[in-house]
Image: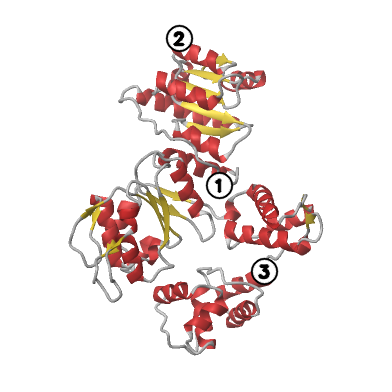
Amino acid sequence: MNSEVTQKTKNMHSRVLIVDDEHNIHYSFQKSFGQEMEILSAHTAEEGIDLLRTQTPDAVVMDIKLPGLDGLEALQKIRKIDSRTPIVIMTAFGTVDTAIEAMKHGAFEYILKPFEVEKMREVLRKAIAAGAARQKTASDRIPLGDPKGNMLVGSSPAMQEIYKLIGRVAGQNVTVLILGESGTGKEMVARAIYHHSTRANKPFLEINCAALPESLLESELFGHEKGAFTGAFERHNGKFEQVNGGTMFLDEIGEMSLLTQAKILRVIQHGEFTRVGGKQIIRTDVRLLIATNRNLEQMIRDGKFREDLYYRLNIISVDLPPLREREGDIPELVDHFLVRYSLEAGKKLQGIEKSAMQKLEVYHWPGNVRQLENCIRRAVVLAKGSTITTDDLELDEAIDQAIADTEQDDDAALKRILQNIAEGKNRMRLWPAVEEKLIRLALQKTAGNQTEAARILGIHRNTLRSRMERYHISSRPTSSF
């Protein structure tokens, strides 16, 4: 009880500056928090900056849309005047860029209007505490950089947290580990980090570690000397030399061999490597963005991933939510893909029928955003009228039900899936829950012919080989699962 009284007394000495041109916002703050803390009001950014200089608030809450100087511009000015006062940015029009830019330029938090009172109270409490702590430390270093585009779509709370995290890490020269299920948009996150980084005017390169055989992957990354292996007729400079000063995105790093992992670790630790077949130490300055949909901790236990590399990668991680956990994002994503693929197809579609949208919203999307994108792209091509209807949608519901059946090891369900794939009704999306069984079945049906099995499954032969290595599948067909 005494601690509660003490906390209330401490808060009453706190000052919070509200910068917003809407009078009802000031009224709401005064009514909700006026008895807990002193509320200062400003209706323009310029007025807010003046009050900041004279009244020294403990925290600032500022809208982005302001007359004259807008909130993001004001944020940067305030940070130059006083880098220690926490600034909470509010907006009724949240976008990817505004969220990332706000966090990148040093906002303490980013909140969408209308806000929940209890959530705002918690944010204010943390901001005031952080401001008090900052007064005891050196001034903050604020990451800077110019935005280069909007690559992510979605305004759900889950994605807003992702945008904030991107804003915090983009300007820092650190390796970032991007996690998430297949199809959640890990590449888009990597590109957003790059575009908002201080290396945005330098090269960006993506390497899919699962798409290349191991021997070729090592040569592509680090280069090779003449005569290093059969066919190496001349020296080849690898990507770490070619992208020096820029950013490299290594997708599906869980498919990388332990030997190549060791060389990646050396690059991260010391910024150096040697070409395949060479002894010369080569220096490089490349920022690494890493992605995987695999459980690296389990791979460490299985002896397939280096523990020391994992801990170097996992200092900062971005864990992307699956589409089923992004409440409210599907209509926004659908609109985005409709515009994009209508232009591509040269069609003037006016939208999507309500019943079709409802069907999309209740679907569970095992393939995540990539599956939704492919669904809309196909619907645009097939649409006969001016709007997308339920008849234009293909959601593979029967196949998804069969996939659910495999949780009970239903061989008949697996065979139905493979039959549908072979007839062209669906393409394999490599769901971790069933891909091993499907690969074994495909190899069994093709008598071990990898090329034919890959064709049936709708994947590249190199991807099939990679998956076979992952699951220790022999090229010889097996008679059962």
Label 2 Cα crowd, 10 Å radius (few <14 / some 14-19 / many 20+): few
Query: Could you tell me how far apart the alpha carbons at marks 2 and 1 are, in whole angstroms?
Result: 40 Å
**In the image, residue 109 above or below residue 265:** above
Q: Which residue is mark 1?
A: 152
* Mark sitting earlier along the chain (2/1): 2
* Mark sitting earlier along the chain (3/1): 1
* 344 left or right of 142 in image: right
Q: Residue furthest left?
A: 279
For numbered disc 3, what is the local secondary structure? loop
Q: Label 2 sits on what residue type?
A: Thr
Quarter in which the N terminus is drawn: top left
**Label 2 close to label 1 by CB (< 8 Å):** no
For numbered disc 2, what is the local secondary structure? helix
Which label belongs to residue 396?
Answer: 3
Q: Label 3 sits on what residue type?
A: Asp
Q: Which residue is mark 2?
A: 54
